[in-house]
Image: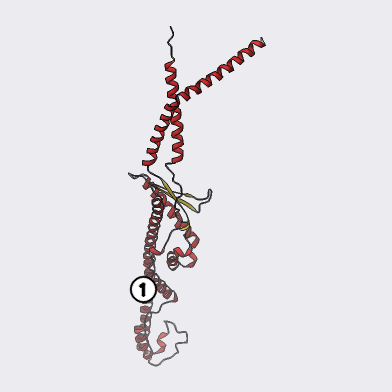
């Protein structure tokens, strides 16, 4: 029984060996057909590689701007609100966040236009918000590099204009606030002056009615409104004239407010000197194209051509030797 099993196994192996040899012989005999299909596949692949649009990707890495790049904005904010209320680090973070948001919006706009463009932005280091990696894909090396630089500058100018508009709104708001404060203080000073003149005039009336011309007391005797007439009519008449021509008296706070207003009115921020980012790595000149991958395409074409050619040879031979059952 064991002998028969071994005989069957050996016979099966011989049959498989014969089948493989026969298969190889068939393929060898049909080598020109296989070569023809390989040539056709290579020609088609070559035509595709020749006429397909090339894709190159340029990459840049950016991070938050330096202090000097937003100095105009921070200086203006310091004048507006004082040193204690201006956090430069917070402004830097806020600016780069606005840049990232606007850049992301631009990528969606370019992706959804009639002829889509591939612009991306993402974190350069996984798990860290900064720095940011931005890429742009174009049909040429120069197009990718210059296109990326153009879009970065476009968003940068947009953010600079927005910061300038923010400053303009804040300057107007702060100016109105300070002008209102000055008007209030001037009104109070005018009312105080009018009250002072009225008090002295009332004392002069009492002095005239009491026929007091010469001073009966000194001004440094802690005189009140009730006994101010003791200074005499002559002195009180001089005081009325003096108070009438005397300029308004303001507190130190008034002059601080006035100085702050003048400083704010001199603010002239220039958007051209404000930047929302700093390059860690400028847009690169790509060395390798994204597509088409010529070598890979040609290898795949040779493989597919050979497989199709081999299939044609085997099917043709099978049809030749096919004998229908009686």
> Secondary structure beneath disc 1?
helix
Which quadrant: the N terminus? top right
- Near-viewer residue (255 or 288): 288
Number of marks in the rendered image: 1
Query: Where is residue 287 shown, x and y percent of the image?
Result: 46, 49
Residue occupying image coordinates x 44% and y 37% = 298
Relative to 275, say whether 50 is above or below.
above
Query: Where is residue 103 shown, x and y percent of the image?
Result: 41, 52
Relative to 256, say whether 246 is above or below.
below
Question: Farthest left residue?
Answer: 114
Which quadrant: the C terminus? top left
- Near-viewer residue (70 or 107): 107
Query: Where is residue 162 shown, x and y percent of the image?
Result: 38, 58
Question: Farthest bottom residue?
Answer: 214
Relative to 29, say whether 241 is above or below.
below
Query: Where is residue 180 shown, x and y percent of the image?
Result: 37, 68
Q: List the residue tagged with mark 1.
A: 187
Q: In this view of the protein, can residue 97 be seen by the observer?
A: yes
- Near-viewer residue (86 or 74): 74
Dot 1 crowding, Cα within 10 Å, few <14, some 14–19, many 20+: few
Question: Farthest right residue?
Answer: 2
Question: Farthest top residue?
Answer: 326
Q: Quadrant of residue 209?
A: bottom left
What color scheme is it? secondary structure
Residue occupying image coordinates x 49% and y 59% = 90
Q: In this view of the protein, can residue 204 be seen by the observer?
A: no
């Amino acid at each position: 029984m064991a002998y028969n099993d071994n005989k069957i196994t050996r016979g099966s192996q011989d049959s498989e060996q014969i089948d493989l040899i026969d298969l190889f012989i068939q393929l060898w005999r049909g080598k020109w057909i296989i070569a023809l299909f390989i040539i056709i596949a290579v020609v088609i692949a070559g035509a595709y590689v020749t006429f397909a649009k090339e894709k190159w990707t340029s990459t840049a890495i950016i991070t938050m701007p330096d202090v000097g790049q937003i100095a105009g904005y921070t200086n203006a904010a310091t004048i507006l609100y004082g040193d204690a209320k201006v956090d430069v680090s917070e402004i830097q973070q806020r600016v780069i966040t606005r840049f990232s948001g606007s850049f992301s919006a631009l990528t969606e706009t370019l992706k959804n236009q009639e002829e889509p463009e591939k612009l991306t932005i993402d974190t350069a280091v996984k798990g860290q918000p900064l720095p940011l990696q931005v890429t742009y894909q174009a049909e040429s090396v120069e197009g990718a590099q210059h296109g990326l630089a153009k879009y970065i500058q476009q968003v940068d100018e947009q953010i600079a204009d927005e910061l300038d508009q923010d400053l303009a709104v804040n300057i107007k708001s702060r100016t109105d606030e300070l002008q209102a404060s000055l008007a209030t203080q001037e009104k109070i000073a005018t009312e105080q002056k009018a009250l002072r003149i009225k008090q002295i005039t009332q004392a002069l009336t009492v002095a005239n009615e009491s026929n007091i011309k010469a001073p009966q007391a000194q001004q440094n005797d802690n005189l009140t409104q009730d006994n101010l007439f003791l200074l005499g009519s002559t002195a009180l008449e001089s005081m009325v004239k003096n108070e009438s021509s005397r300029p308004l008296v303001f507190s130190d706070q008034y002059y601080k407010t006035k100085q702050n207003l003048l400083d704010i009115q001199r603010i002239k921020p220039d958007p051209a000197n404000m930047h929302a980012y700093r390059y860690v790595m400028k847009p690169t000149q790509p060395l390798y194209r994204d597509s088409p991958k010529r070598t890979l395409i040609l290898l795949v074409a040779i493989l597919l051509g050979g497989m199709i050619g081999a299939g044609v040879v085997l099917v043709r031979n099978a049809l030749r030797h096919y004998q229908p059952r009686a």
